[in-house]
Image: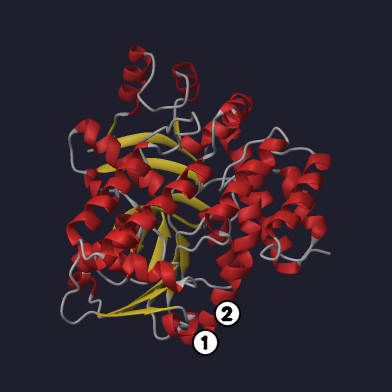
Amino acid sequence: MKIAVLGAGGMRLPLLYQALVDRSQALRLDRLALMDIDAGRLELMLGVTHAMTATPPGLHVDATSSLEAALEGASFVITTFRVGDMAGRVLDERIPLAHGLIGQETTGAGGFAMAMRTLPVLLHVIERMRRSCPQAWLVNFANPSGLLAEAARRAGWERSLGICDAPSTMQHLAARLLDVPAGEVYLDYFGLNHLGWVRRVLHRGEDYLPTFLSMIRAAGGFPGLPFEPDLLLELRMIPNEYLRYYYYARQTVETLKAAPHTRGEFLLGLNEEVRRDLADLLARGETKATVERYRAYLRRRGETYLQGTAESAALPSGMPDGDGGGYADVALDVIEALSGGGERVLIVNAPNQGAVDGMAPEDVVEIPTLVRANGLRPMAVGAIPAHALGLMLRVKAYERLTIEAAAEGSRSKALLALTLHPLVADAATARRLLEEMERAHAPAFPRLQ
């Protein structure tokens, strides 16, 4: 079997590669294509990867900057690219903040800008897949993950889904608190990507969410949880950490504006520093020091997840992948199940198909899904609170319009998408944002008419 990774020059490649090697026999993996348009970064990250993990016999690895070569004959395509790189993320954060709005890479105006840059690239990849690997599964991890999963389905690529490590990390944390294996914990979770809620935490038929909420109330909070206990008790659910942007929008804007730098600015500087260090260590042949420097980078990145901007994470999604529930684990759990390695219930972004009452069957939602050989079966969620459904419907309308705006080059749909998003909610501001984003992100931003 062949797996293609697009955007393989990113800083997470060594973790993904190690996970692939660990599971290569279970996956029957014999070919791996690592593709990135930045050949220098790909070479650097391969150097770190090989310092950390030996390639097993029988696994052929091809590093390339050719999309066609990477896709040819692939059974699975993992998309991890970031269009505009970290400098684009900084713009996505700073432009909205200048208008008194939340600047964030996956939601609100910043998420819109990232989506508009990324959608044309994703659609291009899908067109190439039609010729080079028409039976492949597209496993999208690029952000905004849920919106891109929706776009792939709307483009007619049915063998596709989106993944995010945040729900899986919540599951692993719950299991740790219960002192049980993660596989024994079922999260009754529903929503859209970065817009979801845990309604129940089930272990052997018992719901432990009331216990967790009582613990939070008694303690006056939970370390890293950016929600007041009273709000959680009113909701009777635990929201995904990104719902902070909706529940505390004004407070979050003030916090972000007062911070010395945005998350993107912090990571831009950190990544540049670490790449220089890694290149120097590899050039001197210092393998052990290379691995130590990379692991120190992972710790630093994890410790500052949703911090460095005076923000705090709801749950530690910044845990290294090796701690369970991270990006590599989620991606390979999905691939192993789809390739016949046993059924698994995983929280992924896939078509609703009637699982969540009130959402259309074709709407991509983030819910527990039975993943098995060549198929996905969403688990029933049923009726959800009206406030959650209302927010999901509004954001889903924004997603549809954004996808159509990028595909059609429609200025009117782009403006309406921004206007409808709950974190913008103003037509005049949406117009100014769109004009600034077009200028800032040219030529990656679609040409609109």
Name the amino acid type tagged 2.
Answer: Glu
The quadrant in which the C terminus is found is bottom right
Q: Where is mark 1, residue-wise?
A: 131
Q: Nearer the viewer, residue 120 or 305?
A: 305
Q: What kind of element bears circle 2? A: helix
Residue 36 on image: x %, y %: 45, 71
Please name the residue shown 81% across and 47% down the image. 431
- For this view, does 113 lie left or right of residue 191? right
Find out whether the residues at labels 2 and 1 contact each other: C-beta distance under 8 Å. yes
Q: Which residue is mark 2?
A: 127
Whether residue 38 appears in this view of the structure is: yes
Q: Which residue lies at the image location 39% right of the left edge and 40% below the top edge?
A: 188
Image x and y of residue 96, in percent:
68, 40
Percent across and percent down for residue 223 are: 35, 24
> Where is the N terminus found, in terms of image quarters?
bottom left
- In the depicted structure, whether residue 247 falls above or below residue 203: above
Query: Label 2 neighbourhood size at 10 Å, few (<14), some (14-19), many (20+)?
Result: some
In front of the other: 19 or 168: 19
Rendered position, 80 above or below 314: below
Of the residues shown, which amino acid type is indicated by label 1?
A: Arg
